[in-house]
Image (spheres, rainbow, N blue to C red):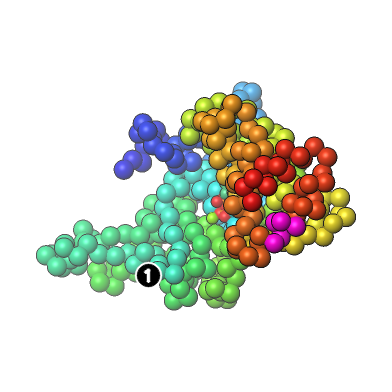
Amino acid sequence: MTTDSTPPAGVLRPHAEQQYADELARLAEHDDRPRPPGWRLSPWAVTTYLMGGELPDGSRISPKYIGPRRLMEVAVATLATDRALLLLGVPGTAKTWVSEHLAAAVSGDSTLLVQGTAGTTEEAVRYGWNYARLLAEGPSEKALVESPLMKAMRTGAVARIEELTRMPGDVQDTLITILSEKTLPVPELGVEVQARKGFTVIATANDRDRGVNELSSALRRRFNTVVLPLPATAEEEVDIVARRVEQIGRALELPDAPAGLDEIRRVVTVFRELRAGLTDDGRTKLKSPSGTLSTAEAISVITNGLALAAHFGDGVLRAADVAGGIVGAVVQDPVSDRVAWQEYLETVVRERPGWQDFYRACREVS
Ligand SMILES: Nc1ncnc2c1ncn2[C@@H]1O[C@H](COP(=O)(O)OP(=O)(O)O)[C@@H](O)[C@H]1O
Ligand SMILES: [Mg+2]
């Protein structure tokens, strides 16, 4: 384990505070605005970290979130109040990504994370015990195993809860006292952990899970909700995909392959049209397949395509390198999605000028 800002060599995916340690340090250096108690940066600098910008010394901060600045301002402002932040949206709208970067910028630590699943227990949210120690010595501070939330309270940091609504209702409810009283009692030891300044919670929840385990109204009142939208325009989505693909390719040390903007534009167009159930020109209605076809999926289709092009092709991203990934993302249900895809392929892709290579490549893998 490491809490140091340099990850050990060979780490597959450094935490945001490790990967962007340099940007965070430079922001802190130039940040003369007031910082809320327990914060590493001012709200203004946190927002700059997320949206990107230029510092007085001319150095650049890369954009992490691409979308409306106002949403990030609302999110950051919420963290400076006594309410927690809930990032809501359909899959692939950067909820997890934004949550990690917010925690990194505000507390310098994005790792205090509880993953919400149907199997998440109260211990994962509150605390558990090292049973060997508990049996040998009885309850003691040493036998206590603190949850990421408890650690965040003790140190005055941001705790993250992923997929909050997937946790069973009674487990969600253990958050109410934590968020309203800012304390976590440990009755076995007769003590409590009182949250230090800087403690707050960023939760993410999936729009599509609505109704799985609906947030109780008592809990909802402790959160300010920020809804992360799908990219407004195709150009914006192409921009997001191109930037992320470039970053991921660098991190994976893929051999250099020019991330063909034309192929990215094509993948984004296909996904957007199928998502909307309508072609870009508004002329043809389409059946929408069941998959989410999110920006995140477009990113992974292109990244896979780049690996194919680099290792098995001539190093240039071509239609054949993305066709398989697109078909895989679109056809999730082998029956109804296949019908939707075939219809799109034959009525739209086939007729579109300049898309013949793509049509042929899709035919080969469909
Ligand atoms: N608006 C956006 N700005 C920057 N990156 C985005 C955006 N939308 C999607 N992404 C990228 O999509 C990927 C998946 O996002 P993720 O946070 O896992 O989605 P979610 O948690 O909403 O399902 C990330 O790599 C993220 O960088
Ligand atoms: Mg997520």
The residue that disc 1 covers is: 122
Span shown in magenta: 339-343
- Judge left or right: residue 279 versus residue 361: right
Q: Position of residue 7 (x, y in %)?
A: 38, 35
Residue 78 seen by the camera: no
Whether residue 99 appears in magenta in the rendering, the answer is: no
Q: Position of residue 159 (x, y in %)?
A: 45, 55
- Judge left or right: residue 46 versus residue 148: right
- Image vertical order of residue 6 relative to residue 284, above or below: above
At numbered mark 1, what does the secondary structure look like: helix, strand or loop? helix
Residue 114 seen by the camera: yes
- Image vertical order of residue 30 relative to residue 2, above or below: above
Quarter of the picture holding the N terminus: top left
Quadrant in which residue 44 is drawn: top right
**Given the image, on which type of amino acid does mark 1 rest?**
Glu
| Residue sitting at the far top | 57
Q: Residues within 10 Å of mark 1 (few under 14, many from 20)?
A: some
Q: Position of residue 238 (x, y in %)?
A: 70, 41
- Judge left or right: residue 216 versus residue 189: right
- What residue is shown at x 53% (from left), y 45% (from top)? 101
- What residue is shown at x 68% (from left), y 47% (from top)? 363
| Residue sitting at the far front | 364
